[in-house]
Amino acid sequence: MDDYPLLNVFWTMLWFFLWIMWLFLLFKVITDIFRDHSLNGWAKAGWLIFCILLPYLGVLVYVIARGRSMGERDVKQAKDSEAAFQDYIRKAAGKQGGGSATEELARLAELKDKGAITPEEFEKAKAKVLA
């Protein structure tokens, strides 16, 4: 350990960390290329070839040119995933409850009386149950 000073260990760790960050960014860009539905096949192939043949320049240009839409696609995918998950939970909970509409209305009225839901929320839920 005497022939490898502590400062060199820190520099090595820094370069290793930067290399790992670079790999994450490269894979993120490549997955975004395939996930983007606004690009046609030739554009996807062009970006992919550019990012593989000249990785540093290709990724830098991609992030500059399409970075904002890349973030928007991430947000849209997260929202879609959350909506699908919430829909699944509603369907699964609805099947297990198996209660009739009158039981559901009684439960909603009880929640309103306890103050757990507001009258506006009660009316929305009641309309949903009766629909």
Image (tube, rainbow, N blue to C red):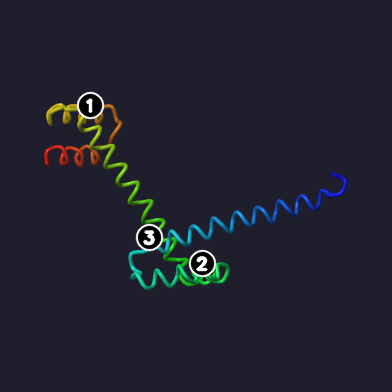
Q: Which residue type carries mark 1? A: Glu
- Is 104 or 83 nearer to us in this picture? 83
On residue 38, which mark appears? none
Q: Residue at x 51, y 71 (%)?
A: 64
Q: Which residue is mark 2?
A: 52
Q: Secondary structure at mark 2?
A: helix
Q: Residue at x 31, y 47 (%)?
A: 83
Q: Which residue is mark 1?
A: 110
- Graded by Cα atoms within 10 Å as few (under 14), some (14 to 19) or many (20 or more), the crowding at tag 1 reads few
Residue 49 pos. (x, y %): 47, 70
Q: Which residue is mark 3?
A: 35
Quadrant location of the C terminus in the rendered image? top left
- Is 47 drawn above or below residue 12 in the view shown? below
Closer to viewer: mark 1 or mark 3: 3
Q: Secondary structure at mark 1?
A: helix
Q: Which residue type carries mark 2? A: Ile
Whether residues under marks 1 and 3 lie with C-beta atoms below 8 angstroms apart, the answer is no
Q: Quadrant of residue 105?
A: top left
- Graded by Cα atoms within 10 Å as few (under 14), some (14 to 19) or many (20 or more), the crowding at tag 3 reads some
- Graded by Cα atoms within 10 Å as few (under 14), some (14 to 19) or many (20 or more), the crowding at tag 2 reads some
Q: Residue at x 60, y 54 (%)?
A: 20
Residue 55 pos. (x, y %): 55, 67
- Is 82 drawn above or below residue 55 in the view shown? above
Q: Which residue type carries mark 3? A: Arg
